[in-house]
Image (cartoon, grey):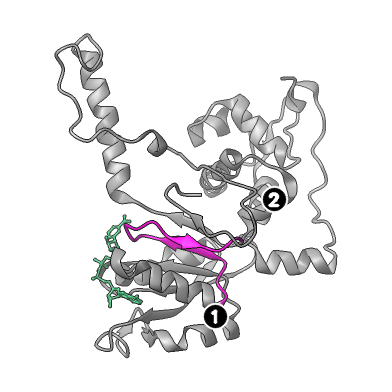
Amino acid sequence: MSTPEDTGRSAPPWAPAVPDPSAAALQRAVPAAERLLAERGIPEASVARLPVYLRALRALVERGVRTVSSEELAAAAGVGSAKLRRDLSHLGSYGVRGVGYEVAPLVAHVSRELGLTQEWRVVLVGVGNLGRALASHGGFAERGTVVVGLFDADPGVVGQEVAGTVVRPMADLAEVVRSEGVCIGVLATPGAGAQAACDALVAAGVTGVLTFAPAVLQVPEGVDVRKVDLASELQILAFHEQRKADAARGGPAGAGAAQPVDPVPAGLAPRATAHAPGHPRGVRRRTGVSR
Ligand SMILES: NC(=O)c1ccc[n+]([C@@H]2O[C@H](COP(=O)([O-])OP(=O)(O)OC[C@H]3O[C@@H](n4cnc5c(N)ncnc54)[C@H](O)[C@@H]3O)[C@@H](O)[C@H]2O)c1
């Protein structure tokens, strides 16, 4: 692939396009990553790498670095430089030959594309061990999100103060989502209560759900679910450790080497972010694989 960096094409204008009213409405209603996928046709894998680039770029800003080559930035982000150039070119962001990328403008550009220049208001449902830890996590604000409500179904939990916020009953959820302009909900309930809590979030008007619960959630078309699954991630690592151990013993699994007790299903390959566009409208979508 001939890259603009190689051909010396200059950087595009950084100024944001003036949004028309419908685009502005869409921006409020739909998570930024979905916009990148749906409107711009940017591959999901590329969108998923943008936060990684942003983290690496922010570290460069903190070190006072003003420009960075694609090779340096790719190394900092842990990807190949050709992939990085291709990903950033999807945003219309091209390095300049002999200079690379200007760091600060690129931070602003990627942040804007990821919707991080606006504040995303989030509610959290399920204020147990994990929910309390998440609510107390200070990193949300740095990433452009702010938790505006904590909710739980247990009357014994409702009314407690967690990280400076009083836990509210589920009956208040719809009102808070509406009045605070919330479009993202975080689920930290046990698996058994997850679908009911997810349904409550969706009924309240939430269109993006981040779930930590070990459950397959069903949501209507137009609602995005991302699943954080610690157990599966560990299982994937264990699978790869097993393969490395097999290779070190000089043969593939099966040549006398121990087999994984519970091999990782193909759909759980590392970084699997299957995007399944084009679901028939109105059909509830299963979310066994994180989107
Ligand atoms: N994904 C991960 O990496 C990861 C890591 C740790 C825990 N977890 C999962 O997170 C979940 C929470 O774990 P925990 O240790 O905090 O559990 P917990 O029992 O301490 O807390 C769960 C809370 O959810 C509330 N709840 C249950 N059903 C509800 C519903 N329908 N609506 C609203 N609130 C409801 C309960 O009242 C409780 O306060 C579990 O499913 C656990 O498996 C996931």
Hey, which quadrant is residue 131 in on the image? Answer: bottom left
Quadrant in which ligand 1 is drawn: bottom left
Q: Main secondary structure of the magenta part?
A: loop
Q: Residue extending furthest top?
A: 250
* Residue 97 visible in the snapshot: no
| Residue located beneath label 2 in the image | 38
> Which label is found at residue 227?
none
Is residue 202 or residue 210 the one in the foreground? 202
Q: Between 105 and 20, which is closer to the camera in this rendering?
A: 20
Q: Residues within 10 Å of mark 2 (few under 14, many from 20)?
A: few
Q: Please identify the quarter of the rendering in which residue 213 is found.
A: bottom left
The type of residue carrying mark 1 is Val
- Queried on whether the Cβ of the residue with tag 2 lies below 8 angstroms from ligand 1, the answer reads no
In this rendering, position of residue 147 left or right of residue 236? right
Q: Return the mark for residue 177.
A: 1
Q: Is residue 26 magenta?
A: no
